[in-house]
Image (cartoon, rainbow, N blue to C red):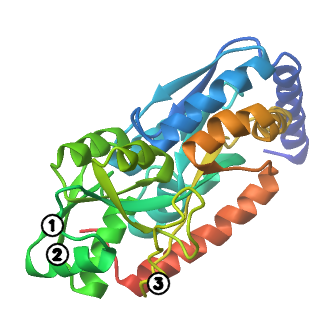
Amino acid sequence: MNKTTGLLGTLFALAAQAVLAQGFPNKPIRLIVTFPPGGATDAMARGLSAPLGKLLGQPVVVDNRPGANSIIGMEACAKSAPDGYNYCMTNNDAISFNPALYAKLPYDLKDFYPIAKVADIDQVIVAHKDTAGASLRQIIDAAKTKPLTWSNFGPGSMGHLYAVWFNNNAGAQFTPVPYKGAGPAMEASIKGEVAVSLFGVGAALPHLKNGTLKAIAIVDEKRSKYLPDVPTIAEMGYPFVVRAWLGFFAPRAIPDEIARRMNREIGKVLEDAEFREKFLAAQAFGAAPNTPEQFMEFIRADAKVAAEQLRAAKITLE
């Protein structure tokens, strides 16, 4: 291919993108969620979809594609048409941890356009009310003498990583039990089918209030304003602190103008006072508008920390 042909191809591609952007949007928009209903990612997707659709003038339809620690949904998103009508929402498991845990993935970060970070999530380790122990140290001591089950959303997910970390670094005997997402894992936790779990604070709060579950520790270096009396794992001398977040992505070749339009509209929703009060606060989510460049910079830093934490903790997948 000569330089003239290459230049013409580039010009035609730019012209096609301009045509797409001018008419956008003129049909419903699909938002793939890499988890089943019932968890933080799905809650954010559904909470965001209504006001975002109102701003865009087209419905945003949630399409749950759970399984394989978000790999199924991420692959589907990467292979979707980059026409501005296909997006995905996932968490840091898929973006920061999977590349450090799996030797081979059917997707790569370069397959996606990072539209916006949409939420930071306070996380809490919880135990069923009948599980022996009222503190993290007591739970770990109990797990040293008798194995305790710990739910997770699949190998490499946050719940799995923490169970393995405590096994490797605190002498515990937690048995990871995989579920397809937070919804099924929460149901199992409430029924007492598993002893210990890790959830977003917003998802856990109703069950902490009614006494079905008990809060053991906040996964952070600072306490959650939603559970101020619950100590952090850092306070108790456990330095493995990995924070959870949610991101909104598109297939990489999406027209830049459309991607930035989506970023601006998402920012408007995140800044809306009613949305912040009635949805974000209710879900215990933190959120602030950010640019694609800021989000990518955040991802690179987060992925670096995740890889370093995993190496230091000697966590690998079998």
Quadrant that contains the C terminus: bottom left
Quarter of the image for residue 83 reads top right
Residue drawn 38% across the image and 83% down it: 313
Residue 167 percent coordinates (x, y): 24, 79
In three-dimensional space, the C-alpha distance between marks 3 and 2, rounded to whole angstroms, equals 19 Å
246 and 194: which one is in front? 194
- Type of the residue with mark 2: Ala
| Residue furthest to the left | 146
Label 1 with label 2: CB-CB less than 8 Å? yes
CB of mark 3 within 8 Å of CB of mark 2?
Answer: no
Amino acid type, label 3: Pro
Residue at position x 34%, y 77% in the image: 315
Task: Identify which residue is drawn at 62% across, 48% down.
Answer: 247
Q: Earlier in the sequence, mark 3 or mark 2?
A: 2
Task: Give me the disc on residue 143.
Answer: 2
Q: Is residue 7 left or right of residue 131?
A: right
Q: Look at label 1 and name its amino acid.
A: Leu
Camera-side residue: 244 or 201? 201
Q: Secondary structure at mark 2?
A: helix
Alpha carbon distance from label 1 to label 3: 22 Å
Does residue 156 show up? Answer: no
The residue that mark 3 highlights is 239
Is 251 placed left or right of 99 in the picture?
A: right
Check the image and report above or below for 310 versus 72: below
Counting from the top left corner in percent of width and height, residue 196 is at 26, 60
Q: Which residue is mark 1?
A: 148
Q: Is residue 122 above or below residue 285?
A: below
Badge 1 or badge 2: first in the primary sequence: 2
Q: Provide the secondary structure element on which disc 3 rests.
A: loop
CA distance separating discs 1 and 2:
5 Å
